[in-house]
Image (tube, grey):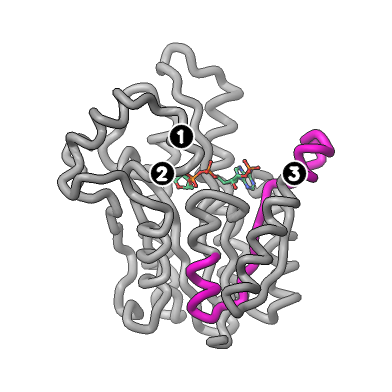
Amino acid sequence: MNGKTVLVTGSSRGIGRAIALQFAREGYRVAVNYYDSPDALPETNQANLQQAEDVLQEIEAAGSNGMLVGADVSKPVAAQSMVDKVAKEFGQIDVLVNNVGINKDQLLLRISDAEWEDIISTNLSSAFYCSRAAVKYMMKKRYGRIINISSVVGIGGNAGQVHYAASKSGLLGLTFSIAKEYGARGITANVIAPGFIQSDMTAGFTEEQKAKMLSGIAVGRLGTPEDVANAAAFLASPGASYISGQLIRVDGCLSSL
Ligand code: NAP
């Protein structure tokens, strides 16, 4: 154990899970956030809890320990109480990884107000709620690492993803501003922009779509959740203490976005 703690939002599967496990391997105590909401069906909440429990077992198998925190982080009260709960249990939140994200590809003309609100509150407002809550604890210790998971489409935009891209661009401004506001308090904030990463989010792509994507990736393969996790762990490491307000693309040198 390295005496440090991390909270990873949306870490019951995909990239968030890989980040949680990477931090566990590096000796962090890990708080695994999974989606849990009074608005969801009880069986959905139960299935998410089960997935999160599996991640906690893997964290323990990696020689670390942690806790589970169910919350819908797109809701301000739920996000705040989740952060408070983790800080109370761990005594401190050293690293916050705002990883939660959803997409629902749709053309601009067909995006409903409800879909826009859903994407923005889940992908962008959640990071604001969690960062605001965590910074309070980080300031007291004069130490903190905030890592936000954006996307390459937040830099270049993408047809069919107006709402998703807008939420991911918003994370850039959020991150850079936190970095400037809290740098003097020992808190760094950085943003990772993954390219095409193999996860449930990209599982629906056809072979034809995958081949097209691959043709634009210089390193010749899709990314893995572990590729993103390695970058997150680096940004939290002592060697990255002078890196703040930065954007790191983890995209294998993707030329199209
Ligand atoms: P994923 O496999 O769909 O996993 C998303 C995770 O977030 C799930 O655990 C999900 O929980 C959780 N979640 C969603 N809404 C939530 C909420 N309101 N409160 C709490 N948890 C919530 O996605 P991923 O591919 O790992 O993506 C992780 C991040 O990377 C996202 O921000 C995504 O935009 C970004 N990203 C991904 C790619 C890619 O190619 N995969 C590329 C660029 C950026 P449930 O299990 O309940 O759904």
Q: Which three-letter amino acid code belongs to the residue tagged 2?
A: Gln
Q: Which mark, by number, is residue 203?
A: 1
> Which residues, given as a range, are shown in magenta?
21-46
Image quadrant in which you'd find residue 74: top right
> Residue 55, image x and y in percent?
64, 60
Front one among 32 and 89 = 32
Horizontally, residue 61 falls left or right of residue 145, namely: right
User: Is residue 93 inside the magenta stretch?
Assistant: no
Q: Which three-letter amino acid code belongs to the residue tagged 3?
A: Ala
Q: Which mark, by number, is residue 47?
A: 3
User: Is residue 43 inside the magenta stretch?
Assistant: yes
For image coordinates 40% across by 48% down, the residue present is 150
Mark 1 or 3, nearer chain start: 3
User: What is the CA distance from the residue labelled 3 to the residue labelled 2?
Assistant: 22 Å
For image coordinates 44% across by 34% down, the residue present is 164
Horizontally, residue 206 falls left or right of residue 84, namely: left
Horizontally, residue 29 falls left or right of residue 232, namely: right
Q: Tell me the element at label 2.
A: loop
Mark 2 or 1, nearer chain start: 2
Residue count near mark 2 (Cα–Cα under 10 Å), binned few <14, some 14–19, many ≥20: some
Q: Which mark, by number, is residue 124?
A: none
